[in-house]
């Protein structure tokens, strides 16, 4: 499961090539939605009403997570377009076609496994609706993949402190950005959960401030706010005139171009990602860093201090401790001292 989660997380950054030209998921233009949803590929429409029903069921009924839906939709469309170019009907697709297609994908093993999972899920739906007799992807074996460490680059503790110090907090935008980065560091929250925060999700319980996050799968988590992060958020709310805003209003808002005036529109996860990239550049740090880098840093830092894995897992919101271990960079760093000792 942790491999699948990781694959979906950075799937949008991968590039894939068809026999025509490279295709990037981030830049891919899916057909415009109709009144009934996204138009099915021609190869599905040609297979009849049952296939079209199965398409809608697969995309809109069986997959509830929007990120998984987007990734699976892209994977299945890529494969069906490939089959159309081979002049294959939906009912003529065989395991050989799936295997050769996966062999030809110039992407990582994790991404190939994600493609295969999408195809298996899609053809299972077609079998259930009696469009095809057997699932051609069911017997295709994925290559063995063992992930011992995530690929997200870590931002060092000193660099994280420098990043916060470099932010100009003389205006509301700087205060907003400092508060967001503070939440990334001091709660290990995912960027998507931060983008969903409303004003009412920052509240007090007795004398303790808390943040309530809406995580993947509709889960809600309450995380206490430490004293310096509380100051970051309160300063931002005060500068933005949001101390007594409606509880349903977004906590972190966009601005009107360069006017530094907040709108009533919530920042998206992409907005936060671009902001972090901009702040990282201003601080002279690596361009490879992303909002997820703070999650790696926080988890590694706590484990280094001897905090039990179970407690760190609860903070990170991981269902499986193996996923938490992917963020642990304590024992897997190759130091220069080690390579200098090679006696060749």
Image: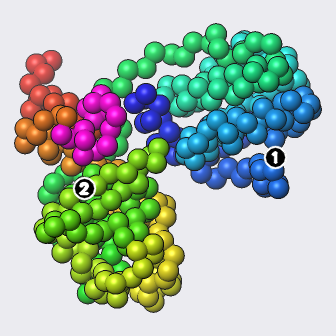
Q: Nearer the viewer, residue 335 or 201?
A: 201
Identified at 41% across, 47% down, the residue is 219
Q: Nearer the viewer, residue 49 or 91?
A: 49
Report if the CB atoms under discs 1 and 2 are less than 8 Å apart.
Answer: no
Q: Is residue 24 above or below residue 185?
A: above
Q: What stretch of residues is rendered in magenta?
A: 311-325
Q: Nearer the viewer, residue 341 or 34?
A: 34
Q: Is residue 189 left or right of residue 273?
A: left
Asked which quadrant contains residue 81, the reply is: top right
Which mark sits nearer the N-terminus, 1 or 2? 1
Q: Is residue 227 above or below residue 136?
A: below
The image shows residue 256 at horizontal and vertical percentages of: 50, 84
Residue matched to label 2: 223
Identified at 50% across, 80% down, the residue is 264
Q: Secondary structure at mark 2?
A: strand
The residue carrying pointer 2 sits among few (fewer than 14), some (14 to 19) or many (20 or more) residues within 10 Å by Cα, namely some
Q: Is residue 104 visible?
A: no
The image shows residue 283 at horizontal and vertical percentages of: 26, 67
Asked which quadrant contains residue 46, the reply is: top right
Question: Mark number for residue 39?
Answer: 1
The chief SS type of the magenta part is helix
Which corner quadrant holds the N terminus? top left
The answer to whether residue 122 is magenta is no
Q: Secondary structure at mark 1?
A: loop
């Amino acid at each position: 499961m942790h491999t699948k989660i990781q694959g979906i997380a950075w799937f949008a950054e991968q590039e894939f090539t068809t026999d025509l030209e490279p295709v990037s998921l981030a830049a891919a233009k899916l057909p415009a939605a109709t009144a009934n949803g996204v138009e099915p590929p021609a190869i599905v429409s040609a297979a009849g009403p049952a296939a079209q029903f199965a398409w809608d069921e697969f995309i809109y009924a069986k997959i509830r997570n929007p990120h998984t839906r987007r990734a699976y939709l892209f994977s299945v469309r890529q494969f069906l377009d490939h089959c159309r170019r081979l002049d294959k009907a939906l009912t003529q697709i065989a395991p050989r076609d799936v295997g050769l297609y996966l062999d030809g994908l110039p992407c990582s093993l994790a991404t190939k496994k994600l493609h295969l999972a999408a195809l298996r899920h899609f053809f299972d739906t077609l079998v259930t609706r009696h469009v095809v007799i057997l699932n051609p992807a069911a017997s295709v074996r994925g290559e063995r993949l063992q992930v011992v460490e995530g690929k997200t680059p870590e931002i060092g503790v000193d660099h994280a402190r420098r990043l916060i110090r470099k932010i100009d907090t003389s205006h509301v935008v700087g205060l907003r950005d400092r508060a967001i980065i503070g939440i990334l560091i001091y709660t290990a929250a995912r960027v998507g959960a931060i983008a969903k925060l409303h004003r009412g999700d920052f509240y007090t319980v007795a004398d303790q401030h808390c943040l309530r996050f809406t995580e993947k799968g509709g889960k809600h988590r309450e995380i206490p706010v430490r004293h310096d992060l509380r100051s970051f958020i309160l300063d931002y709310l005060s500068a933005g005139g949001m101390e007594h805003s409606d509880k349903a209003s977004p906590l972190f808002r966009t601005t009107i171009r360069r006017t530094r005036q907040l709108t009533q529109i919530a920042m998206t996860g992409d907005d936060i990602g671009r902001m972090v990239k901009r702040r990282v550049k201003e601080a002279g740090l690596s361009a490879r860093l992303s909002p997820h880098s703070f999650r790696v840093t926080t988890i590694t830092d706590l484990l280094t201090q001897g905090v039990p894995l179970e407690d760190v897992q609860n903070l990170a919101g991981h269902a499986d401790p193996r996923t938490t271990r992917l963020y642990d960079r304590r024992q897997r760093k190759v130091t220069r001292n080690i390579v200098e000792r090679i006696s060749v």
